[in-house]
Amino acid sequence: MVDAAPAQLAMRAVDERSIGFLVAGASQIAEHRMIEAIWRQPPAPGARDVAGAYVAALFSHNPRRARRFADRHGIVHAGDLLAPLLERREVRCVYVGSHPRHHAETVRAALAAGKHVLCEPPLSEDLDESRALEQMALHRGLILALNYSWRAHGAVQLLRQQLYEGTIGEVLGIRIDNTDALPPDRQGWRLRPPFGGVLWDRLLRDVDLLAFLLLCSPAAVHTHSLQKLWGSSSEEEVMSVVRLRGGPPAQLHDSFLCPHAPTCVTLSGSLGTLRAVSCQVESTVCQIWLRRGGTELPLAWAPIDVYRAGVARFLAAIRLGEAPLATALDDRRAVAAVLAAQQSLSRGQGVDLPLIR
């Protein structure tokens, strides 16, 4: 047994009972969120002093970036060649957080090497490729999970519970304002195709949130482009109307350009309205209000580290056979809505979606 954890995280020791991760992509989310989320998992079953999970290796397409990233986080094995890192026996899982254009190829290589995969969305913009990767994981007895972190947010969990309990009666409509300003340090590839713009960065997650809250998949999307202030080649602000299959209509406002407009989720029902304000993924100051008649009642919610929760659900899927936070099918349905929104923008009309399986 060796103590391999970075000292600043006060980690437990590592042995064969710990689940080793290969982090694919030296990204900001990996650096600031996922490395610690992996190390902060509970102890391995039956071993209070042994880490439940740890970062065993780091892959990046840029070798210098890989080495610098690894040195900052005490990761021994790092490089720009994926295959030898996947061959390492201690690597049981791969977290894919690289540029979305690399997601599918990295996931395919990881599954072929017999590793479980936790991937940032989207898995692929090709729905057939997504299905093929899902089947590849299934045939090998591996977990392929998508890290739709918004699902784990304490405020979102409370909204879902309130809907399940019928607090606002029949849901008649929903609105999501995903308008948290895009900070300067994220204004790189998120403003350029492929996978740039609010459709892939915001609408994708809106649609998944709709499915998570209401258990409905999108049936049609009508999207309008609003304004561009940065002159990027991708959409910077859009308004969409989504018709849900067997559910209420939803209005989605997605923007990079509204620095003082908080991210909000509003659910209107026959008995009342639920409204969550400032409920972006990393927010700890969200407020939830239940409105009935002329009165508003604040609701308390429990803050949750969404990244640790996502990794925990992934490990529970591996160890206990539980459902991960989101699946490839969940991702496919959200991706299909984004593709429909792109078609809607080019055609100037609504686009129907088939039932995605």
Image (spheres, rainbow, N blue to C red):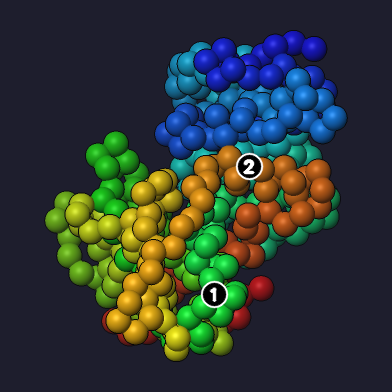
Q: Nearer the viewer, mark 1 or mark 2?
A: 1
Q: Which residue corresponds to the image point at 45% horizontal and 86% vertical from the top-left?
A: 271
Q: Which residue corresponds to the image point at 68% horizontal and 53% vertical from the top-left?
A: 324
Q: Residues within 10 Å of mark 2 (few under 14, many from 20)?
A: many
> Label 2 amino acid?
Val
* Residue 352 vertical position relative to residue 1 in the rendered view, above or below: below
> In terms of secondary structure, where does tag 1 sit?
helix
Residue 303, horizontal then vertical, whole percent? 49, 47
Comparing 21 with 33, the one in front is: 33
> Label 1 amino acid?
Leu
* Residue 61 vertical position relative to residue 11 in the rendered view, above or below: below
Q: Residues within 10 Å of mark 1 (few under 14, many from 20)?
A: some
* Residue 344 vertical position relative to residue 315 in the rendered view, above or below: below
Residue 321, horizontal then vertical, whole percent? 81, 52
Residue 216, horizontal then vertical, whole percent? 56, 77
Q: CA distance from mark 1 to mark 2?
A: 26 Å
Which numbered disc covers residue 26? Answer: none
Residue 305, horizontal then vertical, whole percent? 52, 42
> In terms of secondary structure, where does tag 2 sit?
helix
Q: Among all residues in the image, which is located at the extreme left?
A: 229
Instruction: State left or right for residue 117 relative to residue 7.
Output: right
Q: Earlier in the sequence, mark 1 or mark 2?
A: 1
Q: Which residue corresponds to the image point at 36% horizontal and 49% vertical from the top-left?
A: 285
Residue labelled with disc 1:
163
Residue 61 appears in the picture as rendered: no
Q: Which residue corresponds to the image point at 52% horizontal and 78% vertical from the top-left?
A: 167
Which numbered disc covers residue 311? Answer: 2
Q: Quadrant of residue 249?
A: bottom left
Q: Quadrant of residue 344?
A: bottom left
Q: Quadrant of residue 202?
A: bottom left
| Quarter placement of the C terminus | bottom right
